[in-house]
Image (cartoon, rainbow, N blue to C red):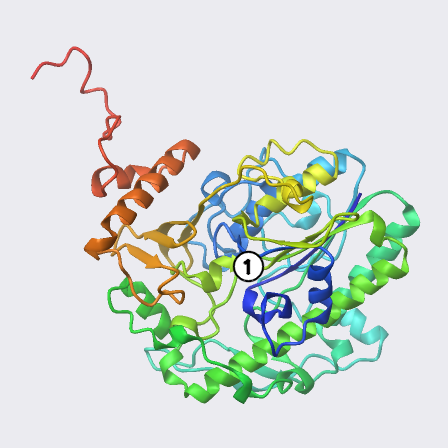
Amino acid sequence: MNLLFLMTDQHRVDTLGAYGNPHVATPNLDRLAATGTRFDRCYTPTAICTPARASLLTGQSPFRHQVLANQERNVGYLEDLRADAFTFPAALRAKGYQLGLIGKWHAGSNRNAASYGFDGPDLPGWHNPVDHPDYLAYLRERDLPPYRISDPIRGTTPNGNPGNLLAARLHQPVEATFEHYLATRAIEHLERYAEDGRPFFLATHFFGPHLPYLLPDEYFDRYDPDLVELPPSIAETFEGKPPVQRNYSAHWTFDTMPIEVTRKLIAVYWGYVTLIDEQIGRILTRLDELGLTDRTSVFFTADHGEFTGAHRLHDKGPAMYEDIYRIPGIVRVPGETPQVRDEFVTLTDCTATILELAGCDPSPAVDSRSLLPLVRGEHPAWRTELTAEFHGHHFPYPQRMIRDDRYKLVVNPESVNELYDLVADPHELVNRYAHPELRPVRRRLMRRLYDLLRERGDNFYHWMTPMYDIGASDYDPTLSAFETEGTTT
């Protein structure tokens, strides 16, 4: 079984036609969803690039593999997986697979994709490296113009400086865009692998639609901002919320820009999604032309979501909202019936699925569960709640989250905890943690999260033991030997 793994960065579920968007043209991903299994409740283990991608490599939660922050903002955490860490490419390589990775790596600082056996140009960094020699050679060979932008969109930071670049016009034709370049390199690898004949795993990781949205006019202006319905959570007041969220809103300069700019930014983001969909279409079409479709399982997902104005935020950060934790998840396995599933699944589950499809032992991916029973239409006993974690970006900020069918609990040790009723309040505007009528829900979820963290060995539970309502403690939280059976009172 060949494996084609398509991945975007910072991609909102609600920008895809397959997930209900009536405006954004995503025909290629919609076709993939219509011919495969679409997971409607797929989540990232953490809404930040490097830890999420390390979880995909290992099938382990971030607390376990310990790569907890992006290189660019790392504040002392590990920057690369340990040398003895299990990774799925090593298992596939032992099975004789050809391995390719085109595009964004961002899963470590000193060890690149080639360190794990992947072919492909080394493209470091968090956004399109438009000065990379291979990209520049691609432009020269095709007599295409170099990268150039104008009309930048940015706000003003609290200290009066210009804010982060959010979008700009790109003065290149689509054939010169980095996205077209990535798809071209992926197609070249497909052709080479097809000629070789051995099974392959080929990943194509687009850097977008991560901000800044840098697009040619035809995509920058593809969607009329008047089509944009602003997210209801744009009414966020941050009342009863952790103060860090208001700080992040100021960091991303939301209130320094007119609301019309927010509409335009969302419309441009949609254009970025369409550009990427078209490049994915080129790859899938070539897969068909090479006669590989019936022998190739195809995945599409993202490392995490994006705010694009939701909760008066951009990018991602220390706020465990659905906007950035829910991600697209599509798996097409040849011969399996198309369907939609609503079980809680995660990006990390892709790891065990890849291993099983390749005939490898998935058990070392200890926090991953193969999706193949679900893809085959079976109804196994499955998780009824989902957990996620965060460890910080610009500064350490530990969080843990658990959500079930209706409620979400977020534990913020330095601040107020959060509890959301996702049926009554799907946009997570009202923190109900202190509401007395939800005390039984709060207690149930707190205890369940506590038990899950203990079972997994996530030491975050130590803070929870004395601080929250988790019932009677069954161990000495001081981790000392002062209290023994011989102690008298």
* Residue 47 or residue 67, whichever sits in front: 47
Regarding residue 108, the answer to whether it shows in the image is: no
Residue 3 against residue 158 in the figure, above or below: above
Residue 124 against residue 336 in the figure, above or below: below
Task: Identify the residue under disc 1.
Answer: 327
Which residue is drawn at the image coordinates 73% and 38% (left, top)?
A: 92
Q: Is residue 454 left or right of residue 3?
A: left
Farthest top residue in view:
486
Q: Horizontal and vertical percent for residue 226?
A: 53, 89
Q: Secondary structure at mark 1?
A: strand
Q: Quarter holding the C terminus?
A: top left
* Residue 121 or residue 37, whichever sits in front: 37
Q: Quarter holding the N terminus?
A: top right
Figure quadrant of residue 13: bottom right
Q: Horizontal and vertical percent for residue 198?
A: 87, 42
Which residue is drawn at the image coordinates 36% and 68% (left, top)?
A: 248
Q: How many numbered circles does the render carry?
A: 1
* Kind of residue at badge 1: Ile
